[in-house]
Image (cartoon, rainbow, N blue to C red):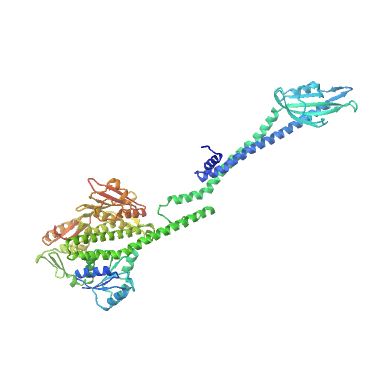
Amino acid sequence: MNLLLAEDDAILADALTEQLRHAGFETEHAPNGAVAEFLLLKQPWDLCILDLGLPMVDGLTVLQRVRQRKPELPVLVLTALDDLQSRVAGLNAGADDYLTKPFDFPELEARLRALLRRSQSSPLANASMAMGALVFERDSRRASIDGAPLELSPREWTLLDLLLTRRDRVVTKEEVAQAWSSERAEPGGNNSIEVYIHRVRRKLEGSGLSIRTVRGLGYLLEAIRPA
Amino acid sequence: MKTFPGSLMLRLTRLVVGDQSLHKQLLLWLVLPQLVLWMAAAFVTYNVAARYANRAIDASLLQATRALARQVKPIGNGLFIDFPRAAQDIIEADPDDRVYYMVSTPPGQFILGSKKLPPPALAGAPRLGEPYFYDGVVDRMQIRVAALYVAYGDSKTRQLMLVQIARGRARRDELARSILGDTVLPLSGLILLMTMIVWAGIRAGLAPLARMRALVEDRAPNDLAPLKIDAAPQELRSLARALNDLLAAVHESVAAQRRFVNDAAHQLRTPLAGLKSQTELALGENVDAAQQQRLERVHESAVRSAHLVNQLLSLARAEPESALAQHSSRVDLRELAREVTAEWVPKALQATIDLGLDDAGEAPPPVIVQGHPLLIREALQNLIDNAIRYAGASAEVTVGVWRDGAFGVVQVADTGPGIPPDLHRAVFERFVRATHEGSGCGLGLAIVRSIAERHAGQVTLDGLAPHGLQVRIALPLAR
């Protein structure tokens, strides 16, 4: 993964570059707006982390210019400005995501990966997902745990697909019902969602994954933590 | 210590001008002189009335005296007085208004009449044909006397005769009193009427002041918007202008302070992010245990500072000026609670806290308030953040939304240790923390309260049995 980090604070840039390398990103550092713009336009990149308060050419300008030439490049804006106007300005200029300093690195990493998933949303890139011992192959519509095939009904498939896509985040019952109806699966009330959750839970046993019920909201798929 | 007249004056002045209302003072200043003038006018009126009454009585006495004098005719060496008994009776008839008369030839030769009347006090020779008027006492009665010296006889036997007629003063006093009464009564009515008019005038005149007072009293303590002075009279207008200038100056300095906090917080963010990242990195490397511990402390402190900076910014944003700049709209508390709670579930799970939403049944009705969506979100986030920070591992945190009268309520309840009731007020202060557990900075509830007040709402804390805390934000429902 090729990543350009445009950040003028040397200490932060140094640490971030190192952390990103650990996380598996090939990271290049641009200390100012001019260099960032030059590098972004000159070379192919998979991702860009852009500070808005860059010297020489400010981040927003860099973003606008790069957007004209590379509309597909995923850009995460990393900034100390978090008021509404700055956010709106950043997103209007074409930022794909917005994270304020100071941040937790795991969150940054998760967002970067989400951006990558979205940008490479060709069926091929998104076709196969693995989480814990579960392998989920969308194109062939096959799932397995530790190599053992997992039998899933269409509704169970849709449910697990949704939970996997949104893993570690809450999926509401409404969202499940919506996914089902858009898949033209047979309609059902909220009670049947509980029934299906129960079934999928049983089928996920031994996968290292669990579906947690979030009171009053819905469900969340997470990896079972070592106790 | 002696009380000097000066200090007495001072006390009087204080009594008059002192801490009373302007209304009372004006009334006092206008009515007191009026009263004094009223008394002076009554006094003068009485004296003038008495003088005129005297003059009238003197005139009638003189007339009677001259008439009597005409009746006295010299016959040879003697005097003949043609004074019929009937006339005498008429003159002496009224017992309440006795009339005395006396004719004598000085020195002291009594001819006719009551004999008791005192002679006029003469300076030099008596002037003939000229009346003397004076007061005297007869039978212990105040009388008014008219005296006339008349000459009779030819030039050789020329003699002086004194004719006196007197009358009790009772009549005169009565007359003066009735004049006084007739003048003073309408005057009193006039004064009373004037007082009432003055009172009404003061009221009307001071009404703009009262309006301005209400304007100042009714505003929120942190509302520094200028006073509206369209309908104020000139004097008040300059006062209001001065006040507005002051407000503007305060406003400016508050805004400058807030800008400074805002800027400082922003400036702190990048170095803090650097510090955090560097320590995270260092923690990931292999260092010996003692260093690891120190690094963890540095990291923890970096995390806390980062949180503090974020909270400071939130607080600056919750202030009225910045809130005014934000867009106010209809906010569905139920929807907001769902979103925010769902967002916070992963963080809660990391802290092994069971965060959930109170189940309001199938398709509950929305609870819509008017407000700044981001601010209300900020408030709710702070409550959930607090609950996660302080409720402790494996606690339950439940978010609920409902209507309560004219208010929409959003509540965060936890099964943590709670806050002792005596600290329920204090925790709303900035940088006050009820516990040293957790890594908070003591701004969360201050932010929540500031936001609630911004929306004319309120925040309440309640303990839960057997332990726990529920914090409730009540915001007025949108119309």
Q: How many marks?
A: 0
Report the residue at 64% width, 38% height from top: B41
Q: Position of residue A31 (x, y in %)?
A: 29, 73
- Residue B411 is at least partly visible in this image: yes
What residue is drawn where x is 88% and y is 22%?
A: B77
State whether residue A82 appears in this view: no
Viewer-proximal residue, B81 or B78?
B78
Q: Nearer the viewer, residue B172 or B262?
A: B262
Residue that sits furthest to the front in the current view: B1
Residue B171, placed above or below residue B440: above
Instruction: Please state the horizontal and vertical placement of residue A199, each as a whole percent of the image.
Output: 13, 59
Which corner quadrant holds the C terminus of chain B?
bottom left
Residue A178 lies, in percent from the top left, at 22, 62
* Residue A29 found in image quarter: bottom left
Residue at 73% from the left image edge and 23% from the top image edge? B93
- Please identify the residue farthest to the left as the structure is shown: A148
Q: Is residue A211 left or right of residue A8?
A: left
Relative image position of residue B191 (x, y in whole percent): 60, 40
The answer to which quarter of the image holds residue B273 is bottom left
Decide which of B1, B238 is in the foreground and name it. B1
Kindly indicate the quadrant of the structure image that contains residue B368: bottom left
